[in-house]
Image: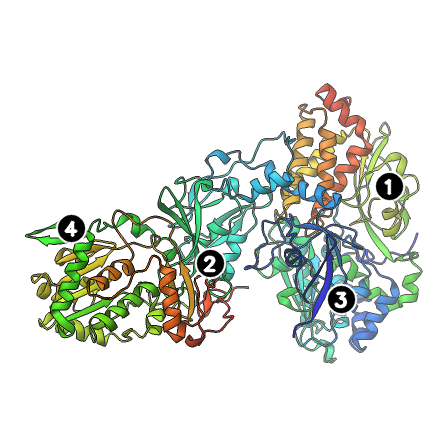
């Protein structure tokens, strides 16, 4: 049991663990002082001097981030002395700052703007020439630096030193000429580089993929989780005009801390760039004709029924939500018993010891908890595809997987493609889609609601930020139609209703409700998930690295 | 005329050689010290009342007592020889003229705090002092005064010289440690203090060259003798660096508490020209508040007396300005230095020092505007006491004192758009 201390902040009593900084104690008291350089995920630098507070019996103002809270301390965050000090620091930071807010991407979520609004003066008294620095410097594949806007808080430098331990960034020159930069011969190209943009409190670091795309006040952030790997980093999906503009990490101490990887951050781009299946289509001669959705469902149902359990199989992606997979499971269990279903492995590289998992699927754990064959090692997929290539499977329903990139998949395309027995349900015109007998447009990331279970067994909500493109629809919705055509009642209005059914039927999900997953998700007891599994602190240090 | 101690070998032929130093009684204190337990050496220094000569005047014995008794880590003594305060050139004289006195002080002090390694951080521009010190170390090592087993006593001490790269801020003790570790010279957050986690995270004491040059005398003649020099709580001899409009500028040794005008008139030989009058004196290096000629009448040059006059002894860099000096121009020159040397870590210093420099530069250039002085003073207020180290305060101190004490000159510059002093 850690020792606790009590202190008074702006008249409010708070109790914190011994060793807590005054700024964190103030956060508990609900009066977090303004700050630039302080970040709970990084070491304390104490250089911006913005978080000044007055502490009884101390002659000078002190920075609350560098001062430990003491028992019986009396802290003032809004005394006249503090106000003058804070306004002074804010004035210093603005003195040489360019007046390019109208074209600055950070405008609207800029600390300088926020604190100017709160602590700034109406008129300026800086009559000297502003400092000029290089603007628009590409420091890496995703990050652009504008040194004129920089306030030298060094958050980005500390991120690269402490979290990725790659040390690309440093402070160069001296005094007012201080500048953030990359070391000679380096580039800010680590797998997590986008985070420096998030933690940059001003517009000095911007993301190439987002800059000049959208004013942030027109962006609506939808709290969701990333679908690019099994970690399930919590994200905000930034949307506007029914499209995704960016993904930014959302704090979750149990999963990703404050961070996310660049691959995940940019994973939304595929939904914008890859060609989509727009309408339900059936093969007609050498091309495709658009058909009605109920007809598509009927045709799929007919095919499955006529092929029977031995002649039909389902390949479902582990990127499908728990709700999607539940309907697949019901299809297998109720409509066509002993229908073969497999969730293929999708591995790339190795776990990096931080946030990136070799398993690039978002919901393998969820599939496993629902009782699917998640095919570790890939044997089930290989055997199923071998049977298909040998003509033993005449109807293959492929959900969210690209058959053409599965081992042995190309041979299957040749065998089953000509019979019209391949049914592709997918957001994109993937490699297998041209060979399909039927292809159904599925909702892409950001267009559906549901639940993912991450690698540690934490159930989290993936949210819809934009409406599905054209007649795309979530997998569960199309599969429910198929189930209906097969005579099984499965009428669901929305994903939460399915989750309710799962919670009642599957012990692993007992007690899970849509609302309980709100925020930071819920560890599933049956999966052995720890209630508080702290997120890793950063990339492991490279072997032999010694940085002081 | 009091006995010369720190400068007793200055000017003596071959004073930097071991032979001459030994012949004049050198290394006797070291021989005595290595036979004593570290605690008694430290106690003697504590009793002597010796205060740090680097600028802050912190009691040396007390600083040493902060070193943890039971740390398993290595312990270091750092000698701050990064003498960079404008108007200060005393450590340079000591290292050039009497490097063995310095070295003897370093080793005795290292013994007192049980440090096995001394790092001497020398200002980069000090090429000659660096060479003289290194030569002295080499000579002393050959004679057994430096090394793993000093004079067979079992006490070991190595001395490592390190040259800085030309940054004033690296004279700040924690920035110096960062620099010594090969990092950017940024002052560290305190706590932890150097005695707990200093160089390489180990217990470290850092002292000025002149401070440690006092130690051999304290060991040789005892704390009680040392207490008779100077004034209460301001004991011992002091090196004063006299510069500016004097007949005989230079380094002079006199007890702490010597009258400022005694230094100026008797040692410095008075103003350089009979037709000039004294205008102002900066008593303790560029960071000290300026004194007007009227304020100079009764000023005992010691830590407490100057603090009582809202300025400081600092590094005892006494800069004498005669009545031909334009105070606006003088301040511009001082602030140009500070603006150039701010490390830029903390916002108020990085921006503030440059800002006040540019205001004064503008006033000097004839582009001053009404309200500039008020802005300058308020900006100074926003700079003081709000940063990691005291650099910001050190820059604000001369600025506020110049403007407050010579406000008329600043106002005239602003009103007339030019300097109003007659051409000198």
The residue beneath circle 4 is: A291
Indicate the secondary structure of the residue bearing disc 3: helix
Indicate the secondary structure of the residue bearing disc 4: loop
Q: Is residue A420 above or below residue B155?
A: above
Whether residue B19 can be seen here: no
- Circles 2 and 1 in contact, beta carbons < 8 Å: no
Q: Earlier in the sequence, mark 1 or mark 3?
A: 3
Foreground residue, B241 or B266?
A: B241
The residue beneath circle 3 is: B104
Q: Quadrant of residue A312?
A: bottom left
**How many numbered circles does the render carry?**
4
- Circles 3 and 4 in contact, beta carbons < 8 Å: no
Q: Residues within 10 Å of mark 1 (few under 14, many from 20)?
A: many
The residue lying at 16 percent from left, 59 percent from top is A298
Q: Is residue B60 above or below residue B345?
A: below
Indicate the secondary structure of the residue bearing disc 2: loop
Q: How is the image coloured?
A: rainbow
Foreground residue, B150 or A80?
A: A80
Q: Position of residue B67 (x, y in %)?
A: 74, 69
> Given the current orientation, which residue lies at the most extreme top position?
B416
- Name the subunit of mark 2: A
- Residue depth check, mark 4 versus mark 2: number of the one nearer the observer: 4
Q: Position of residue B119 (x, y in %)?
A: 66, 64
The residue lying at 29 percent from left, 52 percent from top is A270
Whether residue A180 can be seen here: yes
Q: Which mark is residue B264?
A: 1
- Name the subunit of mark 4: A
Q: Which mark is residue B247?
A: none
- Residue depth check, mark 3 versus mark 2: number of the one nearer the observer: 2
The residue lying at 27 percent from left, 59 percent from top is A475
The residue beneath circle 2 is: A259
């Amino acid at each position: 049991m850690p020792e606790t201390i009590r202190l008074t902040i702006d008249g409010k009593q708070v109790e914190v663990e011994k060793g807590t900084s005054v700024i964190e104690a103030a956060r508990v008291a609900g009066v977090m002082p303004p700050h630039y350089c302080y970040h709970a995920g990084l070491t304390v630098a104490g250089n911006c001097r913005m978080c000044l507070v007055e502490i009884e019996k101390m002659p000078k103002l002190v920075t609350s981030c560098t001062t430990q809270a003491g028992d019986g301390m009396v802290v003032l965050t809004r005394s006249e002395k503090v106000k003058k000090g804070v306004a002074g620091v804010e004035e210093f930071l603005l003195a040489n700052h360019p007046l390019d807010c109208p074209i600055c991407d950070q405008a609207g979520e800029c600390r300088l703007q926020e604190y100017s609004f709160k602590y700034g003066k109406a008129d300026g008294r800086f009559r000297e020439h502003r400092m000029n620095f290089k603007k628009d410097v590409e420091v890496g594949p995703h990050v652009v630096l504008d040194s004129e806007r920089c306030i030298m808080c060094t958050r980005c430098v500390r991120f690269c030193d402490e979290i990725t331990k790659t040390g690309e960034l440093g402070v160069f020159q001296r005094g007012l000429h201080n500048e953030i930069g990359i070391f000679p011969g380096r580039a800010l190209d680590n797998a997590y580089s986008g985070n420096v943009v998030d933690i940059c409190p001003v517009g000095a670091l911007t993301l190439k993929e987002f800059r000049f795309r959208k004013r942030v006040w027109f962006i609506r952030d939808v709290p969701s989780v990333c679908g690019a790997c099994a970690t399930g980093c919590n994200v905000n999906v930034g949307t506007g005009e029914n499209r995704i503009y960016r993904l930014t990490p959302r704090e979750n101490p149990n999963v990703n801390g404050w961070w996310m990887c660049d691959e995940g951050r940019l994973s939304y781009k595929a939904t914008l760039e890859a060609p989509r299946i727009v309408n339900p289509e059936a093969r007609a001669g050498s091309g495709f004709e658009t058909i009605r959705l109920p007809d598509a469902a009927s045709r799929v149902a007919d095919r499955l029924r006529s092929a029977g359990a031995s002649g039909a199989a389902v390949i479902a992606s582990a990127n499908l939500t728990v709700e999607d997979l539940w309907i697949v499971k019901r299809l297998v269990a109720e409509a066509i018993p002993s229908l073969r279903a497999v969730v293929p492995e999708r591995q790339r590289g190795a776990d990096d010891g931080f946030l990136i998992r070799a398993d690039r699927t978002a919901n393998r754990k969820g599939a496993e908890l629902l009782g699917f064959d998640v095919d570790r090692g890939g044997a089930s997929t290989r055997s199923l595809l071998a049977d298909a290539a040998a003509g033993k499977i005449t109807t293959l329903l492929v959900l969210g997987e690209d058959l053409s990139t599965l081992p042995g998949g190309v041979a299957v395309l040749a065998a089953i493609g000509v019979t019209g027995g391949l049914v592709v349900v997918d957001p994109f015109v993937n490699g297998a889609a041209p060979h399909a007998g039927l292809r159904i447009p599925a909702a892409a990331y950001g267009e559906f609601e549901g639940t993912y279970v991450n690698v540690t067994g934490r159930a989290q909500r993936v949210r819809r930020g934009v409406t599905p493109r054209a007649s795309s629809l979530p997998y569960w919705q199309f599969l429910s139609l198929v189930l209906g055509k097969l005579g099984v009642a499965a009428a669901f209005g929305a994903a939460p209703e399915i989750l309710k059914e799962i919670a009642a039927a599957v012990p692993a999900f007992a007690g899970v409700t849509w609302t309980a997953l709100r925020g930071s998700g819920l560890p599933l007891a049956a999966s052995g998930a720890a209630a508080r599994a702290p997120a890793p602190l950063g990339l492991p240090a490279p072997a032999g690295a010694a940085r002081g | 005329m009091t006995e010369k101690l720190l400068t007793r070998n200055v000017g003596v032929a071959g004073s930097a050689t071991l032979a001459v130093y030994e012949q004049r009684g050198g290394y006797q204190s070291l021989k005595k010290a290595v036979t004593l337990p570290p605690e008694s050496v430290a106690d003697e220094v504590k009793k002597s009342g010796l205060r740090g000569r680097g600028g802050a005047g912190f009691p040396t014995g007390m600083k040493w007592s902060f070193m943890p008794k039971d740390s398993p880590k290595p312990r270091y003594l750092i000698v701050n020889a990064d003498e960079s305060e404008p108007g200060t050139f005393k450590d340079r004289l000591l290292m050039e003229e009497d490097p063995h006195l310095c070295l003897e002080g370093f080793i005795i002090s290292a013994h007192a705090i049980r440090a096995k390694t001394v790092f001497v951080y020398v200002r980069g521009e000090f090429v000659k002092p660096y060479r003289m010190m290194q030569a002295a170390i080499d000579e002393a090592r050959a004679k057994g005064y430096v090394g793993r087993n000093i004079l067979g006593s079992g006490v070991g001490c190595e001395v490592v010289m390190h040259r800085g790269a030309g940054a004033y801020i690296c004279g700040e003790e924690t920035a110096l440690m960062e620099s010594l570790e090969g990092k950017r010279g940024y002052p560290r957050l305190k706590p932890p203090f150097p005695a707990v986690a200093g160089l390489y995270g180990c217990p470290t004491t850092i002292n000025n060259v002149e401070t440690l040059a006092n130690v051999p005398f304290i060991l040789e003649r005892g704390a009680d003798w040392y207490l008779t020099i100077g004034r209460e709580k301001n004991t011992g001899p002091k090196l004063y660096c006299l510069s500016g409009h004097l007949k005989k500028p230079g380094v002079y040794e006199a007890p702490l508490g010597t009258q400022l005008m005694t230094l100026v008139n008797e040692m410095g030989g008075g103003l350089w020209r009979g037709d000039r009058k004294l205008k102002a004196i900066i008593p303790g290096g560029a960071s000290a508040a300026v004194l007007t000629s009227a304020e100079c009448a009764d000023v005992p040059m010691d830590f407490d007396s100057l603090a009582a006059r809202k300025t400081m002894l600092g590094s005892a860099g006494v800069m004498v300005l005669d009545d031909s000096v334009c105070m606006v121009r003088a301040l511009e020159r001082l602030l140009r230095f500070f603006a150039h040397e701010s490390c830029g870590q903390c916002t108020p210093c990085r921006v503030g020092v440059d800002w006040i420099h540019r205001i004064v530069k503008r006033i000097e250039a004839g582009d001053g505007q009404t309200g500039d002085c008020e802005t300058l003073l308020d900006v100074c207020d926003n700079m003081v006491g709000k940063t990691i180290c005291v650099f910001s305060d050190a820059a604000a101190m001369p600025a506020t004192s110049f403007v407050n004490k010579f406000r008329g000159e600043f106002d005239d510059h602003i009103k007339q758009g030019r300097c109003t002093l007659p051409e000198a």
